[in-house]
Image (spheres, rainbow, N blue to C red):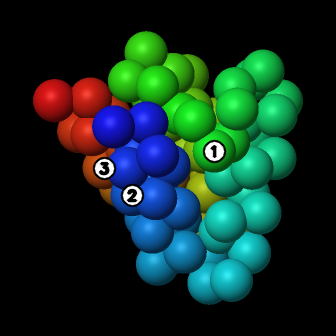
Amino acid sequence: MSRELTKKIQEIMSAEMGHIGVFIVSKQCRDLGVDPEDIEPEDLNDLAKALGKVMLTFGGSEKARKVEREIKKLAN
């Protein structure tokens, strides 16, 4: 399950940020103390917020909210 979460989060970020999306996921995971190759469901809320903040800078508030929502949905 955790590798599946990693792949889905990378896909969400790659769709928004292109090839650097995977790097952004890895960086934010490391900053949060999360193994980027083994993201667990309990990591999703903090990771969604962190990636939302990144997207606020690169894509504006609408993209930030979209990314945050999509990642939080993965917890279900």
Q: Which residue is mark 2?
A: 8
Mark 2 or 1, nearer chain start: 2
* Amino acid, disc 2: Lys
Comes first in the chain, label 2 or label 3 = 2
Q: Residue beneath label 1, please?
A: 37
Q: Real-space Cα distance between discs 2 and 1?
A: 12 Å
For the residues marked 2 and 3, what is the alpha-carbon distance in whole angstroms?
Answer: 10 Å
Secondary structure under the numbered disc 2 in the rendered image: helix
- Find numbered disc 1 in the image and state the secondary structure of the residue it sits on: loop
Amino acid type of disc 1? Answer: Glu
Q: State whether residue 6 is above or below residue 22.
A: above
Which is closer to the viewer, label 3 or label 1? 1
The three-letter amino acid code for the residue at tag 3 is Glu
Viewport quadrant of the C terminus: top left
Looking at the rendered image, the quarter that the N terminus falls into is top left
Q: Residues within 10 Å of mark 3 (few under 14, many from 20)?
A: some
Spot the residue most to the bottom. Answer: 18
**Residue under circle 3?**
70
